[in-house]
Image (cartoon, coloured by chain):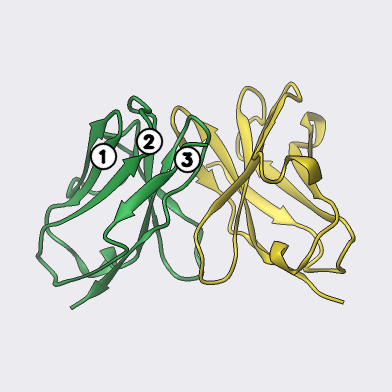
Amino acid sequence: AIQLTQSPSSLSASVGDRVTITCRASQGISSALAWYQQKPGKAPKLLMYAASNLQSGVPSRFSGSGSGTDFTLTISSLQPEDFATYYCQQFNSYTFGQGTRLEIK
Amino acid sequence: QVQLQESGPGLVKPSETLSLTCFVSGDSISSYYWNWIRQPAGKGLEWIGRIYTSGSTDYNPSLKSRVTMSVDTSKSQFSLNLNSVTAADTAVYYCARETWVAFDIWGQGTMVTVSS
């Protein structure tokens, strides 16, 4: 099965910072990747699909890029509501990354 | 708008079968893949499997021997059965709709505890 490795596993940042999270696949998956945001006690929320497409209603400060094995999620200017855990997911065999916890510095 | 709602017992005994249902409202259940995902407390997400409205299924290889999914389009719902459960199956279980390279709609999740 294809494995996804996210880095970092956790990250401390301040409001207004630019943040990048990386997701690496163990083999090529073209652009078959999605990103989710999850807050405590809530279901994950779709942010990006097909690696670089912004889901309707998601703020434009979120962006995604990559193809093949290396992908990134960037938040251009952190807002208080962005502190959460982020997951990538690949759509060849549907596995998720282990998550990146984004905390307030 | 489309909403998903999981339902089922919150407590299951070891070695028994976990059974959950996901009700789809606000849109047709037809022509989509419907998925189950779980998350143990404090841990990451694990994909369990998916079912198309035709009944075609795909399962996580690590759970395949214990999982069965079904769909009832007349009731706008789909179901998960996981047999021979152990404490390791204790988790929040989510259902989700699959669109192009994404799970775009998720249920709120239901906590299932495996304990005697």
Q: Chain of mark 1?
A: A
Q: Is residue B24 visible?
A: yes
Q: Residues within 10 Å of mark 1 (few under 14, many from 20)?
A: many
Vertical order, A93 against B110 (above or below): above
Q: Quadrant of residue B39?
A: bottom right
Q: Chain of mark 2?
A: A
> Can you identify the residue that label 2 sits on?
A33
> Who's green, chain-wise?
A
Asked if the residues shown at circle 1 and circle 3 are in contact, with their CB atoms under 8 angstroms apart, the answer is no
Asked if the residues shown at circle 2 and circle 3 are in contact, with their CB atoms under 8 angstroms apart, the answer is no
Q: Which mark is residue A81?
A: none
In terms of secondary structure, where does tag 2 sit? strand
Q: Amino acid at mark 2?
A: Leu
> Can you identify the residue that label 3 sits on?
B104
B5 relative to A57 in the view: left or right: right
Kindly report the distance in space between the C-alpha atoms of the residues bearing marks 1 and 2: 8 Å
In terms of secondary structure, where does tag 3 sit? strand
Kindly report the distance in space between the C-alpha atoms of the residues bearing marks 1 and 3: 19 Å
> Can you identify the residue that label 1 sits on?
A71
Q: Residues within 10 Å of mark 2 (few under 14, many from 20)?
A: many
